Image (cartoon, rainbow, N blue to C red):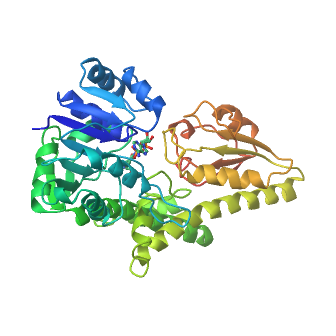
Amino acid sequence: MSKKVVTIGLGYIGLPTSALIASNKIAVHGVDISQYVVDTINAGKIHIVEPDLDKEVESAVKQGYLIADTKPVVADVYLVVVPTPFKGNYEPDISYVQAATEGIIPLLKDGDLYIIESTSPVGTTEKMMNLIFSIRPELKDKIYLAYCPERVLPGNVMYELVNNDRVIGGVNEESTLKAISFYQQFVKGKLHKTNARTAEMCKLTENSSRDVQIAFANELSLICDKAGINVWELIELANKHPRVNILQPGCGVGGHCIAVDPYFIVSEYPMEARIIGKAREVNNYKSFWCAEKVKTAKLEFELKRGKKPKIAILGLAFKPNIDDLRESPAKYIAQRIMQDAQDEMYFIVEPNIKEHHVFKLTNVTDAIENADILVFLVAHNEFKNVKISSDKVILDFCGVTNK
Ligand SMILES: NC(=O)c1ccc[n+]([C@@H]2O[C@H](COP(=O)([O-])OP(=O)(O)OC[C@H]3O[C@@H](n4cnc5c(N)ncnc54)[C@H](O)[C@@H]3O)[C@@H](O)[C@H]2O)c1
Protein backbone atom coordinates (compact mmCIF):
# COMPACT_ATOMS: atom_id res chain seq x y z
CA MET A 1 0.00 0.00 0.00
CA SER A 2 2.62 2.57 1.10
CA LYS A 3 5.08 3.70 -1.51
CA LYS A 4 7.09 6.05 0.67
CA VAL A 5 6.98 6.98 4.35
CA VAL A 6 8.52 10.01 6.05
CA THR A 7 9.10 9.62 9.80
CA ILE A 8 9.86 12.82 11.71
CA GLY A 9 11.89 12.30 14.90
CA LEU A 10 14.39 9.43 15.06
CA GLY A 11 14.63 8.84 18.82
CA TYR A 12 13.65 5.97 21.12
CA ILE A 13 10.34 5.51 19.28
CA GLY A 14 10.86 7.02 15.83
CA LEU A 15 13.99 5.06 14.92
CA PRO A 16 12.68 1.58 15.85
CA THR A 17 9.42 2.40 14.05
CA SER A 18 11.32 3.54 10.94
CA ALA A 19 13.50 0.40 11.01
CA LEU A 20 10.44 -1.85 11.37
CA ILE A 21 8.61 -0.22 8.45
CA ALA A 22 11.78 -0.38 6.33
CA SER A 23 12.27 -4.06 7.20
CA ASN A 24 8.89 -4.63 5.49
CA LYS A 25 10.46 -3.32 2.29
CA ILE A 26 8.72 0.06 2.43
CA ALA A 27 10.99 3.03 1.65
CA VAL A 28 11.45 5.21 4.74
CA HIS A 29 12.92 8.70 4.74
CA GLY A 30 13.67 9.38 8.43
CA VAL A 31 14.02 13.01 9.48
CA ASP A 32 15.77 14.41 12.54
CA ILE A 33 17.00 17.89 13.41
CA SER A 34 20.19 16.41 14.83
CA GLN A 35 22.94 16.04 12.21
CA TYR A 36 24.70 13.58 14.54
CA VAL A 37 21.60 11.33 14.62
CA VAL A 38 21.27 11.51 10.83
CA ASP A 39 24.97 10.72 10.20
CA THR A 40 24.97 7.85 12.71
CA ILE A 41 21.93 6.20 11.10
CA ASN A 42 23.21 6.67 7.55
CA ALA A 43 26.40 4.89 8.68
CA GLY A 44 24.16 1.93 9.59
CA LYS A 45 24.63 2.56 13.32
CA ILE A 46 22.38 3.68 16.18
CA HIS A 47 22.63 6.46 18.77
CA ILE A 48 20.35 4.92 21.43
CA VAL A 49 20.38 1.76 23.51
CA GLU A 50 17.72 -0.75 22.41
CA PRO A 51 18.22 -4.52 21.96
CA ASP A 52 18.13 -5.77 18.33
CA LEU A 53 17.68 -2.28 16.89
CA ASP A 54 21.28 -2.10 15.63
CA LYS A 55 20.83 -5.15 13.35
CA GLU A 56 17.52 -3.84 11.96
CA VAL A 57 18.93 -0.39 11.21
CA GLU A 58 22.13 -1.75 9.68
CA SER A 59 20.21 -4.05 7.37
CA ALA A 60 17.55 -1.45 6.42
CA VAL A 61 20.23 1.13 5.56
CA LYS A 62 22.33 -1.41 3.64
CA GLN A 63 19.33 -2.52 1.56
CA GLY A 64 18.45 1.10 0.84
CA TYR A 65 15.02 1.05 2.51
CA LEU A 66 16.03 3.51 5.26
CA ILE A 67 17.65 6.88 4.66
CA ALA A 68 18.08 9.57 7.33
CA ASP A 69 18.04 13.28 6.56
CA THR A 70 17.57 16.64 8.26
CA LYS A 71 14.81 17.57 5.80
CA PRO A 72 11.61 15.78 4.76
CA VAL A 73 10.82 14.81 1.16
CA VAL A 74 7.58 14.20 -0.76
CA ALA A 75 6.01 10.93 0.43
CA ASP A 76 2.65 9.19 0.83
CA VAL A 77 2.62 8.78 4.61
CA TYR A 78 4.01 11.18 7.24
CA LEU A 79 4.56 9.97 10.81
CA VAL A 80 5.26 12.54 13.56
CA VAL A 81 7.30 11.04 16.44
CA VAL A 82 8.93 14.07 18.06
CA PRO A 83 9.16 14.87 21.80
CA THR A 84 6.21 16.34 23.71
CA PRO A 85 7.64 17.55 27.04
CA PHE A 86 5.91 19.93 29.44
CA LYS A 87 6.81 23.55 30.04
CA GLY A 88 7.83 25.04 33.42
CA ASN A 89 4.17 25.45 34.43
CA TYR A 90 3.38 21.76 33.68
CA GLU A 91 1.57 22.69 30.47
CA PRO A 92 2.20 20.42 27.48
CA ASP A 93 4.63 21.74 24.90
CA ILE A 94 3.41 20.77 21.43
CA SER A 95 5.80 23.12 19.64
CA TYR A 96 7.88 20.17 18.35
CA VAL A 97 4.77 18.56 16.82
CA GLN A 98 3.86 21.90 15.28
CA ALA A 99 7.38 22.47 13.87
CA ALA A 100 7.42 18.93 12.40
CA THR A 101 3.98 19.52 10.84
CA GLU A 102 4.94 22.92 9.41
CA GLY A 103 7.94 21.27 7.78
CA ILE A 104 5.79 18.92 5.72
CA ILE A 105 2.83 21.19 4.87
CA PRO A 106 4.38 22.33 1.56
CA LEU A 107 4.96 18.68 0.57
CA LEU A 108 1.42 17.35 1.16
CA LYS A 109 -0.69 16.21 -1.79
CA ASP A 110 -4.05 14.50 -2.45
CA GLY A 111 -4.45 11.10 -0.77
CA ASP A 112 -1.60 11.51 1.76
CA LEU A 113 -1.84 10.09 5.27
CA TYR A 114 -0.61 12.19 8.25
CA ILE A 115 -0.26 10.44 11.62
CA ILE A 116 0.83 11.76 15.01
CA GLU A 117 2.40 9.13 17.31
CA SER A 118 3.84 11.59 19.87
CA THR A 119 2.00 11.54 23.20
CA SER A 120 -0.25 14.58 22.85
CA PRO A 121 -2.90 16.54 24.71
CA VAL A 122 -6.49 15.96 23.61
CA GLY A 123 -7.28 17.97 20.48
CA THR A 124 -3.72 18.11 19.10
CA THR A 125 -4.55 16.17 15.90
CA GLU A 126 -7.48 18.52 15.19
CA LYS A 127 -5.23 21.53 15.90
CA MET A 128 -2.66 20.26 13.40
CA MET A 129 -5.44 19.57 10.89
CA ASN A 130 -6.62 23.19 11.22
CA LEU A 131 -3.04 24.41 10.84
CA ILE A 132 -2.57 22.36 7.65
CA PHE A 133 -5.87 23.52 6.13
CA SER A 134 -5.22 27.17 7.08
CA ILE A 135 -2.13 27.07 4.86
CA ARG A 136 -3.33 24.53 2.26
CA PRO A 137 -7.17 24.93 2.15
CA GLU A 138 -7.29 23.03 -1.16
CA LEU A 139 -6.36 19.83 0.74
CA LYS A 140 -9.62 19.79 2.79
CA ASP A 141 -11.26 16.35 2.44
CA LYS A 142 -8.33 15.31 0.24
CA ILE A 143 -5.89 14.02 2.90
CA TYR A 144 -6.23 11.65 5.87
CA LEU A 145 -5.25 12.56 9.43
CA ALA A 146 -5.03 10.24 12.44
CA TYR A 147 -3.55 9.77 15.87
CA CYS A 148 -1.93 6.49 16.96
CA PRO A 149 -0.18 6.44 20.35
CA GLU A 150 2.80 4.27 21.19
CA ARG A 151 2.84 2.01 24.25
CA VAL A 152 6.09 0.06 23.91
CA LEU A 153 8.40 -0.78 26.80
CA PRO A 154 12.00 0.40 26.32
CA GLY A 155 14.21 -2.69 26.22
CA ASN A 156 11.56 -4.71 24.37
CA VAL A 157 10.61 -2.22 21.67
CA MET A 158 11.29 -4.32 18.57
CA TYR A 159 8.98 -7.08 19.82
CA GLU A 160 6.24 -4.84 21.19
CA LEU A 161 6.09 -2.60 18.09
CA VAL A 162 4.92 -5.65 16.16
CA ASN A 163 2.89 -7.49 18.78
CA ASN A 164 1.16 -4.88 20.96
CA ASP A 165 -2.44 -3.94 20.26
CA ARG A 166 -2.78 -0.35 19.03
CA VAL A 167 -5.48 2.27 19.27
CA ILE A 168 -6.01 4.26 16.07
CA GLY A 169 -8.23 7.31 15.79
CA GLY A 170 -8.74 9.45 12.72
CA VAL A 171 -10.32 12.89 12.45
CA ASN A 172 -13.04 11.05 10.46
CA GLU A 173 -13.93 7.45 9.62
CA GLU A 174 -12.01 7.44 6.32
CA SER A 175 -8.83 8.61 8.07
CA THR A 176 -9.17 5.90 10.74
CA LEU A 177 -9.52 3.19 8.08
CA LYS A 178 -6.64 4.55 6.03
CA ALA A 179 -4.37 4.59 9.11
CA ILE A 180 -5.43 1.05 10.04
CA SER A 181 -4.52 -0.22 6.60
CA PHE A 182 -1.11 1.46 6.99
CA TYR A 183 -0.32 -0.20 10.35
CA GLN A 184 -1.68 -3.56 9.15
CA GLN A 185 1.41 -3.84 6.97
CA PHE A 186 3.73 -4.35 9.95
CA VAL A 187 1.69 -4.76 13.19
CA LYS A 188 0.47 -8.21 14.30
CA GLY A 189 -1.35 -6.93 17.41
CA LYS A 190 -5.03 -5.95 17.12
CA LEU A 191 -5.72 -2.50 15.69
CA HIS A 192 -8.58 -0.88 17.60
CA LYS A 193 -10.64 1.73 15.81
CA THR A 194 -11.72 5.01 17.45
CA ASN A 195 -11.61 8.77 16.86
CA ALA A 196 -8.57 11.05 17.27
CA ARG A 197 -9.62 12.63 20.57
CA THR A 198 -10.31 9.25 22.21
CA ALA A 199 -6.99 7.85 20.97
CA GLU A 200 -5.14 10.88 22.38
CA MET A 201 -6.93 10.52 25.71
CA CYS A 202 -6.35 6.76 25.74
CA LYS A 203 -2.56 7.18 25.90
CA LEU A 204 -2.85 9.79 28.68
CA THR A 205 -5.31 7.57 30.55
CA GLU A 206 -3.00 4.54 30.47
CA ASN A 207 -0.13 6.42 32.08
CA SER A 208 -2.35 8.33 34.51
CA SER A 209 -3.86 5.05 35.63
CA ARG A 210 -0.39 3.71 36.47
CA ASP A 211 0.46 6.96 38.27
CA VAL A 212 -2.70 6.87 40.40
CA GLN A 213 -2.13 3.23 41.35
CA ILE A 214 1.47 3.90 42.33
CA ALA A 215 0.33 6.95 44.33
CA PHE A 216 -2.01 4.67 46.31
CA ALA A 217 0.94 2.39 47.20
CA ASN A 218 3.14 5.38 48.04
CA GLU A 219 0.43 6.88 50.25
CA LEU A 220 0.14 3.54 52.08
CA SER A 221 3.90 3.58 52.64
CA LEU A 222 3.66 6.98 54.38
CA ILE A 223 0.78 5.81 56.56
CA CYS A 224 2.56 2.55 57.45
CA ASP A 225 5.74 4.39 58.36
CA LYS A 226 3.80 6.40 60.95
CA ALA A 227 1.81 3.37 62.12
CA GLY A 228 4.88 1.14 62.56
CA ILE A 229 3.70 -1.37 59.93
CA ASN A 230 5.86 -3.01 57.24
CA VAL A 231 4.18 -1.76 54.05
CA TRP A 232 5.64 -4.57 51.91
CA GLU A 233 4.17 -7.23 54.17
CA LEU A 234 0.87 -5.33 54.31
CA ILE A 235 0.57 -5.14 50.50
CA GLU A 236 1.51 -8.79 50.09
CA LEU A 237 -1.25 -9.75 52.52
CA ALA A 238 -3.86 -7.39 51.05
CA ASN A 239 -3.10 -8.78 47.57
CA LYS A 240 -4.15 -12.24 48.77
CA HIS A 241 -7.71 -10.89 48.34
CA PRO A 242 -8.92 -12.24 44.98
CA ARG A 243 -9.93 -8.82 43.68
CA VAL A 244 -7.16 -6.61 45.14
CA ASN A 245 -3.92 -5.86 43.29
CA ILE A 246 -1.93 -3.06 44.93
CA LEU A 247 1.33 -2.02 43.23
CA GLN A 248 4.64 -1.57 45.07
CA PRO A 249 5.65 1.76 46.61
CA GLY A 250 8.93 3.40 45.64
CA CYS A 251 10.83 6.64 46.06
CA GLY A 252 8.52 8.50 43.64
CA VAL A 253 7.61 8.19 39.99
CA GLY A 254 9.94 9.05 37.13
CA GLY A 255 10.68 8.66 33.45
CA HIS A 256 9.42 10.68 30.54
CA CYS A 257 5.93 9.11 30.37
CA ILE A 258 4.18 8.31 33.68
CA ALA A 259 5.63 11.35 35.47
CA VAL A 260 4.75 13.63 32.54
CA ASP A 261 1.59 12.55 30.73
CA PRO A 262 -0.91 13.04 33.62
CA TYR A 263 -0.08 16.76 33.54
CA PHE A 264 -1.48 16.84 29.98
CA ILE A 265 -4.88 15.99 31.47
CA VAL A 266 -4.57 18.11 34.62
CA SER A 267 -3.54 21.26 32.76
CA GLU A 268 -6.55 21.05 30.41
CA TYR A 269 -9.12 19.84 32.94
CA PRO A 270 -7.95 21.18 36.34
CA MET A 271 -11.42 21.18 37.94
CA GLU A 272 -12.24 17.62 36.94
CA ALA A 273 -8.88 15.83 37.12
CA ARG A 274 -8.67 15.80 40.91
CA ILE A 275 -7.46 12.26 41.62
CA ILE A 276 -5.04 12.46 38.69
CA GLY A 277 -3.62 15.76 39.96
CA LYS A 278 -3.48 14.52 43.55
CA ALA A 279 -1.63 11.36 42.46
CA ARG A 280 1.07 13.54 40.85
CA GLU A 281 1.34 15.48 44.15
CA VAL A 282 1.54 12.29 46.26
CA ASN A 283 4.20 10.76 44.04
CA ASN A 284 6.26 13.97 43.99
CA TYR A 285 5.85 14.35 47.75
CA LYS A 286 7.12 10.80 48.29
CA SER A 287 10.51 11.81 46.85
CA PHE A 288 10.69 14.89 49.07
CA TRP A 289 9.73 12.72 52.08
CA CYS A 290 12.49 10.20 51.31
CA ALA A 291 15.08 12.99 51.22
CA GLU A 292 13.82 14.33 54.56
CA LYS A 293 14.02 10.81 56.05
CA VAL A 294 17.68 10.59 55.07
CA LYS A 295 18.43 13.97 56.63
CA THR A 296 16.77 12.86 59.89
CA ALA A 297 18.72 9.57 59.88
CA LYS A 298 21.95 11.56 59.44
CA LEU A 299 21.21 13.74 62.49
CA GLU A 300 20.16 10.77 64.63
CA PHE A 301 23.35 8.92 63.72
CA GLU A 302 25.49 11.90 64.67
CA LEU A 303 23.72 12.40 68.00
CA LYS A 304 23.91 8.71 68.89
CA ARG A 305 27.42 7.87 67.72
CA GLY A 306 29.13 11.24 68.06
CA LYS A 307 30.51 11.31 64.49
CA LYS A 308 29.36 12.17 60.99
CA PRO A 309 27.91 9.20 59.10
CA LYS A 310 29.15 7.86 55.78
CA ILE A 311 26.15 7.52 53.48
CA ALA A 312 25.55 5.21 50.51
CA ILE A 313 22.92 6.28 47.99
CA LEU A 314 21.99 3.20 46.00
CA GLY A 315 20.36 3.77 42.61
CA LEU A 316 19.84 6.85 40.42
CA ALA A 317 17.78 5.48 37.49
CA PHE A 318 14.03 6.05 37.29
CA LYS A 319 13.26 2.34 37.56
CA PRO A 320 15.11 -0.94 38.21
CA ASN A 321 17.74 -2.32 35.84
CA ILE A 322 17.86 0.49 33.28
CA ASP A 323 20.35 3.30 32.58
CA ASP A 324 17.72 6.03 32.05
CA LEU A 325 17.88 8.92 34.53
CA ARG A 326 15.23 11.14 32.88
CA GLU A 327 12.83 12.65 35.47
CA SER A 328 14.29 10.20 37.97
CA PRO A 329 13.05 10.63 41.55
CA ALA A 330 16.16 8.82 42.83
CA LYS A 331 18.38 11.39 41.13
CA TYR A 332 16.25 14.19 42.62
CA ILE A 333 16.59 12.66 46.12
CA ALA A 334 20.36 12.26 45.73
CA GLN A 335 20.63 15.92 44.66
CA ARG A 336 18.51 17.11 47.60
CA ILE A 337 20.57 15.14 50.10
CA MET A 338 23.85 16.36 48.64
CA GLN A 339 22.66 19.99 48.68
CA ASP A 340 22.86 19.89 52.49
CA ALA A 341 26.10 17.92 52.61
CA GLN A 342 28.58 19.08 55.24
CA ASP A 343 31.55 16.86 56.05
CA GLU A 344 29.82 13.52 55.55
CA MET A 345 31.24 11.13 53.02
CA TYR A 346 28.90 9.91 50.26
CA PHE A 347 29.04 6.82 48.10
CA ILE A 348 26.79 7.08 45.05
CA VAL A 349 26.00 3.84 43.26
CA GLU A 350 24.33 3.36 39.88
CA PRO A 351 25.45 0.04 38.40
CA ASN A 352 23.80 0.70 35.01
CA ILE A 353 25.96 3.69 34.06
CA LYS A 354 29.72 4.05 33.89
CA GLU A 355 29.96 7.71 34.85
CA HIS A 356 27.86 10.76 35.64
CA HIS A 357 28.69 14.42 35.05
CA VAL A 358 27.57 15.45 38.58
CA PHE A 359 27.97 12.39 40.82
CA LYS A 360 31.20 10.48 41.39
CA LEU A 361 30.12 6.83 41.23
CA THR A 362 31.26 3.99 43.50
CA ASN A 363 30.71 0.25 43.13
CA VAL A 364 28.04 -1.44 45.22
CA THR A 365 30.38 -3.64 47.31
CA ASP A 366 32.59 -0.75 48.47
CA ALA A 367 29.57 1.42 49.22
CA ILE A 368 27.80 -1.19 51.33
CA GLU A 369 30.98 -2.18 53.16
CA ASN A 370 32.09 1.36 54.00
CA ALA A 371 28.89 3.36 54.59
CA ASP A 372 27.07 3.68 57.92
CA ILE A 373 23.69 4.58 56.40
CA LEU A 374 22.46 2.65 53.34
CA VAL A 375 19.77 4.43 51.33
CA PHE A 376 18.16 2.06 48.80
CA LEU A 377 16.31 4.10 46.17
CA VAL A 378 15.99 1.72 43.20
CA ALA A 379 15.48 -2.06 43.34
CA HIS A 380 18.29 -2.93 40.91
CA ASN A 381 19.22 -6.63 40.71
CA GLU A 382 22.73 -5.79 41.98
CA PHE A 383 21.23 -4.70 45.32
CA LYS A 384 19.29 -7.91 45.88
CA ASN A 385 20.74 -10.43 48.34
CA VAL A 386 23.72 -8.24 49.26
CA LYS A 387 25.26 -9.01 52.67
CA ILE A 388 24.68 -6.16 55.10
CA SER A 389 26.26 -6.15 58.56
CA SER A 390 23.92 -5.53 61.50
CA ASP A 391 25.50 -2.21 62.57
CA LYS A 392 24.29 -0.40 59.43
CA VAL A 393 21.30 1.92 59.34
CA ILE A 394 19.07 0.85 56.42
CA LEU A 395 16.61 3.14 54.68
CA ASP A 396 14.99 0.96 52.05
CA PHE A 397 12.50 2.99 50.00
CA CYS A 398 12.09 0.38 47.26
CA GLY A 399 11.74 -2.89 49.19
CA VAL A 400 14.89 -4.41 47.72
CA THR A 401 16.16 -5.69 51.10
CA ASN A 402 12.73 -6.89 52.20
CA LYS A 403 12.96 -10.64 52.26
N1 LIG B 1 10.37 6.56 24.76
C1 LIG B 1 9.28 5.91 25.12
O1 LIG B 1 9.35 4.88 25.81
C2 LIG B 1 7.93 6.39 24.69
C3 LIG B 1 6.83 5.52 24.85
C4 LIG B 1 5.58 5.94 24.41
C5 LIG B 1 5.43 7.21 23.85
N2 LIG B 1 6.52 8.04 23.72
C6 LIG B 1 6.30 9.35 23.11
O2 LIG B 1 6.88 9.34 21.80
C7 LIG B 1 7.36 10.66 21.46
C8 LIG B 1 8.82 10.56 21.08
O3 LIG B 1 9.53 10.10 22.21
P1 LIG B 1 11.02 9.55 22.12
O4 LIG B 1 11.29 8.86 23.42
O5 LIG B 1 11.23 8.83 20.85
O6 LIG B 1 11.82 10.94 22.08
P2 LIG B 1 13.38 11.15 21.79
O7 LIG B 1 13.76 12.37 22.51
O8 LIG B 1 14.12 9.88 22.02
O9 LIG B 1 13.44 11.40 20.20
C9 LIG B 1 12.86 12.46 19.56
C10 LIG B 1 13.71 12.85 18.36
O10 LIG B 1 13.03 13.88 17.66
C11 LIG B 1 13.99 14.81 17.16
N3 LIG B 1 13.29 16.07 16.85
C12 LIG B 1 12.84 17.04 17.67
N4 LIG B 1 12.19 17.99 16.98
C13 LIG B 1 12.23 17.63 15.69
C14 LIG B 1 11.72 18.19 14.49
N5 LIG B 1 11.03 19.32 14.48
N6 LIG B 1 11.96 17.54 13.32
C15 LIG B 1 12.66 16.38 13.30
N7 LIG B 1 13.14 15.79 14.41
C16 LIG B 1 12.93 16.40 15.59
C17 LIG B 1 15.03 14.89 18.26
O11 LIG B 1 16.27 15.35 17.78
C18 LIG B 1 15.07 13.41 18.73
O12 LIG B 1 16.09 12.68 18.07
C19 LIG B 1 7.08 11.52 22.68
O13 LIG B 1 5.86 12.17 22.53
C20 LIG B 1 6.98 10.50 23.82
O14 LIG B 1 6.20 10.98 24.89
C21 LIG B 1 7.75 7.65 24.12
Q: Residue at x 39, y 69 (%)?
A: 265
Total count of labels: 0
Looking at the image, residue 136 lies above or below residue 38: below
Quadrant in the picture for residue 197 = bottom left
State the image coordinates of residue 239 (x, y, percent, origin top left).
37, 62
State the image coordinates of residue 37 (x, y, percent, origin top left).
44, 31
Looking at the image, residue 215 lies above or below residue 96: below
Left or right placement of residue 191 versus residue 127 in this view:
left
> Can you name the residue that lies furthest to the right here?
306
> Can you name the residue that lies furthest to the bottom here?
271
State the image coordinates of residue 221 (x, y, percent, origin top left).
54, 65
Is any atom of residue 229 visible in this view?
no
- Quarter of image, ligand 1: top left
Quadrant in the picture for residue 263 = bottom left
Looking at the image, residue 282 lies above or below residue 8: below
Left or right placement of residue 295 versus residue 36 in this view:
right
State the image coordinates of residue 33 (x, y, percent, origin top left).
44, 39
Q: Residue at x 41, y 60 (%)?
A: 261
> Can you name the residue that lies furthest to the top here?
62
Of residues 295 and 70, the one drawn nearer to the viewer in this rendering: 70
Of residues 309 and 20, the one drawn nearer to the viewer in this rendering: 20
Of residues 370 and 115, the one drawn nearer to the viewer in this rendering: 115
Left or right placement of residue 74 versus residue 325 in this view:
left
Is any atom of residue 164 visible in this view?
yes
Q: Residue at x 29, y 38 (%)?
A: 17
Q: Quadrant of the N terminus?
A: top left
Quadrant in the picture for residue 22 = top left
Q: Residue at x 40, y 37 (%)?
A: 32
Looking at the image, residue 22 lies above or below residue 89: above
Left or right placement of residue 112 versus residue 203 in this view:
left
